[in-house]
Image: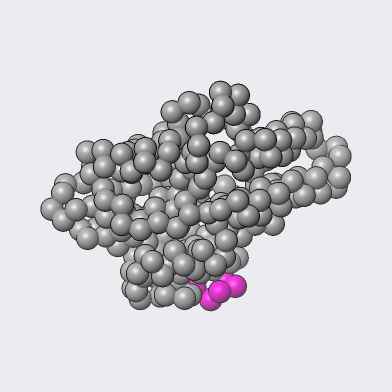
Amino acid sequence: MSLRFHEIAEGRHRILNPITDAKLDLLGEVTRLRPGMRQLDLASGKGEMLCRWAAAHGVEGVGVDISHVFHAAALARAAELGVEDKVRFERAEAAHYAAGAKGADYDLVSCIGATWIGGGLTGTLDLMIPALAEGGTLLVGEPYWIDEPPPEAYEALGMEPGEFTSLGGILERFESCGVELVEMVLADGDSWDRYMASQWWSLTEHLAAEPADPEADEIQKFLDRARSSHLMYGRRYLGWGVFVLKRPKGRPPGR
């Protein structure tokens, strides 16, 4: 799916996933952040998490995202919160950047809702773990199935069978990567609505303001599909959460 369509849809978002401001703050608390902690945030979007945690907890670090639109927004947010001396944003492909960060010993490595960078959850964890310091923390945002969806839901939501799994299946995937689940913060139906429904208005506004957009027909299809798939399947069957992980002491990086 076109990155540009997501940039338009999420134009009014600060947090580019179905988590609320309150739950982002809660995630910072349960992650036990401390001043001077170094974070690598892969596919960092508009940098809200890194900037907010730098301001509230004294975290330092690097955010990496491929979108020039989101990169510019992250720089502006760092300036707005006065944390330009604590955070840096790189416009780059996250998987490539992670490969170059092996052995960097970050206290916290995160990828929130973008495990496509590693071809799925386990592949993304394999990218993240080598950059993590001994005793460090991993944060992964990932969808999961609340209940087994009907076959037609996969096509409607643009997902392949087996791409995502249940909460129990996520736990098994974590264990296969040699990491331990120690905490989690889950979205709910209302936060899904706020994330998805506000995109419909942003897309509608764009189409009204830019009727000559050469991709207008495709944007309209994207809007129609996003709206129907959420109402018909996503809200009932699809959950989302951020999972806090540790690598057991002495375990070597990777599988």
Query: Is residue 181 or residue 102 the one in the foreground?
Result: 181
Give how far across and how far down residue 205 sits, in percent.
81, 49
Give how far across and how far down residue 156 sits, in percent.
63, 29
Give how far across and how far down residue 191 sits, in percent.
60, 55
- Classify residue 12 as left or right of residue 251: right
**Numbered marks: total:** 0
- 52 over 100 or under it: above or below: below
The quarter of the rendered structure image containing the N terminus is: top right
Q: Is residue 82 magenta?
A: yes
Q: Residue at x 37, y 65 (%)?
A: 31
The quarter of the rendered structure image containing the C terminus is: top left
Residue 238 in view of the camera = yes
Q: Residue at x 43, y 35 (%)?
A: 165
Query: Is residue 12 or residue 4 the one in the foreground?
Result: 12
Specify the farthest residue to the left: 250
Residue 90 in view of the camera = no
- Classify residue 40 as left or right of residue 81: left
- Classify residue 215 as left or right of residue 152: right
Q: Label the magenta part by its dominant secondary structure.
A: helix
Give how far across and how far down residue 71 sits, in percent.
56, 55
Q: Residue at x 82, y 42 (%)?
A: 207
Q: Residue at x 48, y 75 (%)?
A: 55
User: Which residues are drawn in magenta?
Assistant: 79-83
Specify the farthest residue to the front: 147
